[in-house]
Amino acid sequence: MAELGRRYNPKEKKTKNTKNTGKKKLDKILNLLIGVVVVLILIVAAFIVIGGTDDPDTNNKKVAKTTQQDPEEKDENIVEKDPKEIEKEKAQQAEDAQEAEEQDQTQTDTNENSINTTEENMDDTTTETDTSSNDTTTNDDYNYEDSQTASTEASSDPNVAKVITDSSWQPTKTSQKDSGSTHVSSYSEGSADWNEKITTIANTTGLDKKDMIIWYVKNGGSPDTSVGIVSSKDKKKSYRVSMKWIANEGWKPTKLEVLKTYKGAY
């Protein structure tokens, strides 16, 4: 009986099964936890891979990269001009610059000529009137250098090269009739009195009217006196002529000044 009890002990067998069962449960729990961790890892990895493109910073970087143009692409977008077009543009610019320079020079000459002057050329009607007057004057083609009655003297005016007077000077024949004690002098271009003044100046200087620039004609200090400043067209010769009105006879030159320059001689 004693031996039989040793071989079969129900209590000992029950204790052994309880331990195995607990171990199996613990293994299942660990396996379950491991599975949960693996699933979480996969979920996180999938979120990073798939959902990472929605990151605002990442998107901003992509937008910035897209909007920033590659310098090389920028150079490729520049359209090179045809060499012929470039040459045309350069030629046009040179032509414009030349025209501007010519306009400036023309404006300078115009301003210089317009200071207290009359027009350089008289109209056709005036020229015809002057020509008929010249036919009757005694001073046509006068040349003081060849005159035997002309005298020359120096002047204190630094702009005057010499002063010439000639006893042979005669009044320019006039078509005007004096009705009063003094002559009514006219400085209106084209008038009879004006034309006779210009004729007197031309005859005294020896300049042809077509080769004469009238810079200034003014009152000489009284109604019966007048002064005119003229030059040749090339401006190489400049003169100042003083004249006096002789009643019912016309304008008579009284002094011829050879100027160094017409500028400032007014």
Image (tube, rainbow, N blue to C red):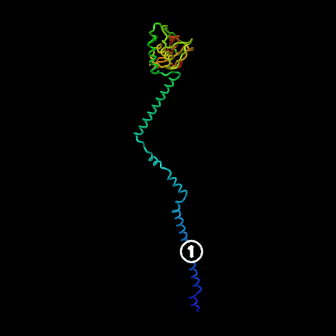
In terms of secondary structure, where does tag 1 sit?
A: helix
What residue is shown at x 55% (from left), y 75% (from top)? 28
Is the N terminus in the top left, top right, bottom left or bottom right quadrant? Answer: bottom right
What residue is shown at x 48% (from left), y 50% (from top)? 69
Of residues 33 and 245, the one drawn nearer to the viewer in this rendering: 245
Of residues 135 and 35, the one drawn nearer to the viewer in this rendering: 135
Q: Residue furthest front?
A: 179
What residue is shown at x 53% (from left), y 21% (from top)? 116
On the question of residue 82 being in view, the answer is yes
Residue at which label 1 appears = 29
Q: Residue furthest left?
A: 84
As drawn, 9 above or below 222: below
Report x, y in % for residue 245.
Answer: 53, 12
As drawn, 212 above or below 60: above
Report x, y in % for residue 108.
Answer: 50, 26
Disc 1 crowd rating (10 Å Cα; few below 14, some 14-19, many 20+) is: few
Q: Label 1 is placed on what type of residue?
A: Ile
Report x, y in % for residue 38.
Answer: 53, 69
Residue 221 image-quadrant placement: top right
